[in-house]
Image: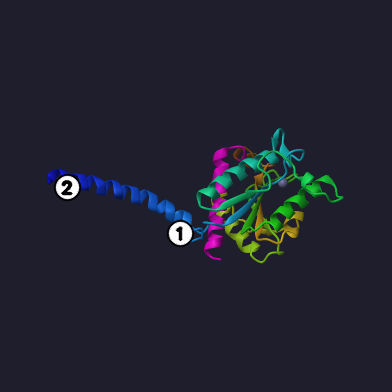
Amino acid sequence: MKKSFKFICIYCTISLVLLSTILPLILSNNTAFSTPDNPLKGKIILIDPGHGGIDGGTNSGNILEKNINLEASIILKTELINRGAKVMMTRDKDVSLENLCKDNDYRHRRDLKARVNMINTNDIDAYISIHVNAVNNAPYVKGPMVFYSNTNINSKTLASYVQDSLNTIAGTNRNPNVADYFLLTNVRKTGILVELGFITNNEDKNLLIKKDYLKKLSTGIVIGLEKYFENK
Ligand SMILES: [Zn+2]
């Protein structure tokens, strides 16, 4: 009697442990919809690391924008996946994209057109284009800036959430800006262009080459995206 009671207890304990570990996994796989606790669940986010390959973007000595963009984007991708989002990228290695556009246009424009085309033709909930800023003769200007276009009605809202979140991290007090960049004005989907910081500012430059800081900025972008989907 005693022995079989012990056996039942062990059996119950094992069953409970299995249920408590397997059940959440089954549930999480079956609920591909966002919830108030997890607004990014099932959302499809397209990350566009600016420049690449022959196009280094802006630079400071041998520190190239294209590499910072890609590193930050890969960190952002991981964070988004950890929160249940699905992630697409315009590039995940050091390449430019002009070969994907057959238009009779100059190289840089074909690269941008290829990115625009990827964003417009894929079924996505938002896109984030990642860049690094530079300004001549103003080495004191620093901090992240978020840009959007009025071609999509929701982009400004997303830009505000992400800029607020990045302000908290960088100790800045900016508003998002409208910009007439080719990518922003030719894309119809909701999205923003994030300039992570200024390579022309020493403080920013030293931060942007550190993985820790790129992770902080990525978390800031994720928090902004979460707030946007929470309130949508
Ligand atoms: Zn750039």
Q: Residues within 10 Å of mark 1 (few under 14, many from 20)?
A: few
User: Does 78 sit above or below residue 228?
Assistant: above
Amino acid at the residue labelled 2 = Phe
Q: Is residue 58 left or right of residue 176?
A: right
Image x and y of residue 2, in percent? 13, 45
Question: Magenta segment, principal secondary structure?
Answer: helix
* Amino acid carrying mark 1 in the image: Asp
Q: Residue furthest left?
A: 1
Numbered label tally:
2
Q: Quadrant of residue 55?
A: top right
Residue 136 sits inside the magenta stretch: no
User: Mark 2 or mark 1: which is in front?
Assistant: 2
Q: Residue visible at 68% across and 61% down?
A: 189
**Residue extending furthest toward the top:** 62
Q: Which mark is residue 130?
A: none
Q: Nearer the viewer, residue 130 or 122?
A: 122
* Picture colour scheme: rainbow
Q: Position of residue 133 (x, y in %)?
A: 69, 46
Nearer-the-camera pick, 201 or 68: 68
Q: Marks 2 and 1, Cα distance to the nearest angstrom? A: 41 Å
Q: Which residues are the magenta region? A: 208-232
Task: Name the side, left or right, on which 104 lies relative to 28.
Answer: right
Residue ID for mark 1: 37
Instruction: Determine the secondary structure under disc 1.
Output: loop
Question: Does 13 sit left or right of 44 as displayed?
Answer: left
Q: Which x, y percent locates residue 6?
A: 18, 44
Query: Where, quadrant-wise, is the C terminus in this rendering?
Result: bottom right
Q: Say if disc 2 is inside 8 Å of ligand 1.
A: no
Circle 2 sits on which residue? Answer: 5
In front: 110, or 23?
Answer: 23
Considering every residue shown, the one lying at the far right of the view is 104
Instruction: Tell me the crowding category of disc 2: few under 14, some 14 to 19, or many 20 or more residues within 10 angstroms, Cα based.
Output: few
